[in-house]
Amino acid sequence: MDYDSLFSADTASFMRSPVREIFKRVDLSKIYSFAGGYPSPDAFDLEGVKQSALQVIDRYGSKALQYNATQGIPELRQALSERYGVPLERVQVTTSSQQGIDVCTRVMVDPGDVVLTSNPSYLGALQSFRSYRAHIVGVPHSDDDGEFRARYEQAIDQCKKQGRKVKFLYMIPDFQNPSGETLPLSQRRLLVELAREHGFVIVEDSPYRELRYRGHDVPTIYSLDPDCVLHLGSFSKILAPGLRLGWILGNPQLLDQIYVCKQSLDLCAPVLDQYIATQFVTSGRLDANIEKIKGLYSRRCQGMQELLARYMPQGVTWTRPDGGLFLFLTMPQGFDAVKFYDRALDNGVAYVAGSFFHPDGSGLNTMRLNFSFMNLERIDKGLQLLARLIGEELDALGLRCDAGQ
């Protein structure tokens, strides 16, 4: 049978995740993996989840195993409403924050419509945008506020000249994936100004926001204008990704359309998981677990930066995040992290090439490294190996590669 003739036009826009392809090829326990955004197994409160599950069954019985509301069970929505200080009608539970990204795109984007994003940006979001045939415009970051605004205005003006409509701007303002960097308050305000002026929505993706290891919290973009921002949250990084639970905070008119769309996707998020998460939040276990995670990851984040300074050849630079799970490595121009990947994996170390996070395919000389999954001993050994391989590659390419930094 000619299956190709049966596929929809959308399938041509589907993008394979290089991260998921890695997991198909290798056993993560047998290599040094800086590739995925996996939480550490030590970050899971197994006893707490067990006790929460038992308490849920005792309290709710068969209700916890039944269908429930598409918006999310009332108990979880109430817990999220109180935790984040928003009205109940502004809370929609999702089956992971990835679904939140996807359903926002599905509701707002027609083929050819524009989604603005940073360049680089989260790979999973780019996959979703492409699957709906959005026109993705990545805007390079600038630390200068004037230049930052000018770049976004230029991108918006160019889209208008092409007859394209900007539907939303996607941003991870806190400890961005892949860079680990945080957007300052002044630039968050500029984005809100642009959204108001040009009539588009901001989708603020914040799965890492509560994992800050140093410095002070920056107000969410949502807090600056709750009616032009959809704020996405997730339990994946602060509780357990296996629960597949997230949420959207937003204007009820936007959430109503998302609610109707979600009905056709999965009817409702996993009900038992929602009750377990509710119990975990209301009992105080979530806050305690977040503090434990922050202590664990803070040491690994700082340790990785110190090890990079010890091992990496001169000319290799990296971001210095204040939280989250990732940092971004940049090699001298001429280094191709995509071509280099097979050699690294054959030698037992994995990363994600940075070009996959760039909508325009740039960033060939970059790679994303995760510091949450492995302990410091394995991070040390993995970075020694990766640094040696990078040094050898730079030598082979005739690029500057002096030991130490």
Image (cartoon, grey):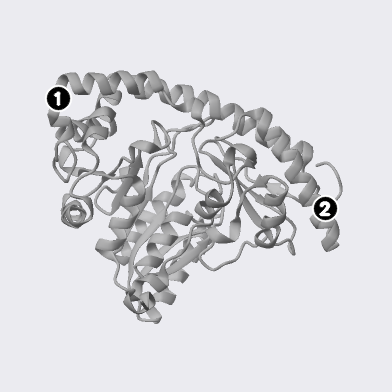
Q: Position of residue 244 (x, y in %)?
A: 33, 41
Residue 173 horizontal side relative to residue 71, left or right = right
Q: Quadrant of residue 327?
A: top right
Residue 32 can be seen in this image: yes
Nearer-the-camera pick, 56 or 205: 56
Q: Please tell me how crowded label 2 is: few (under 14), some (14-19), or many (20+) other residues with Cα within 10 Å.
A: some
Q: Residue at x 23, y 33 (%)?
A: 272
User: Which residue corresponds to the image point at 50% horizontal and 47% vertical from the top-left?
Assistant: 176
What residue type is disc 2 on?
Glu
Placement of 6 over or under 319, stated as above or below: below
Residue extending farthest front:
1
Label 2 secondary element: helix
Describe the element under mark 1 as helix, strand or loop. Answer: helix
Which of 103 and 152 lies nearest the eye of the viewer?
103
Q: Quadrant of residue 44?
A: top left
User: Could you tell me the amino acid type at mark 1?
Assistant: Gly
Q: What label does residue 392 carry, if any?
A: 2
Left or right position of 333 against 18: right
Residue pointed to by mark 1: 61
Foreground disc of the pair 2, 1: 1
Q: Position of residue 164 (x, y in %)?
A: 35, 77
User: What residue sits 28% from the left and 56% below the top?
Assistant: 103
Give the distance between the C-alpha atoms of the residues marked 2 and 1, in whole angstroms: 61 Å
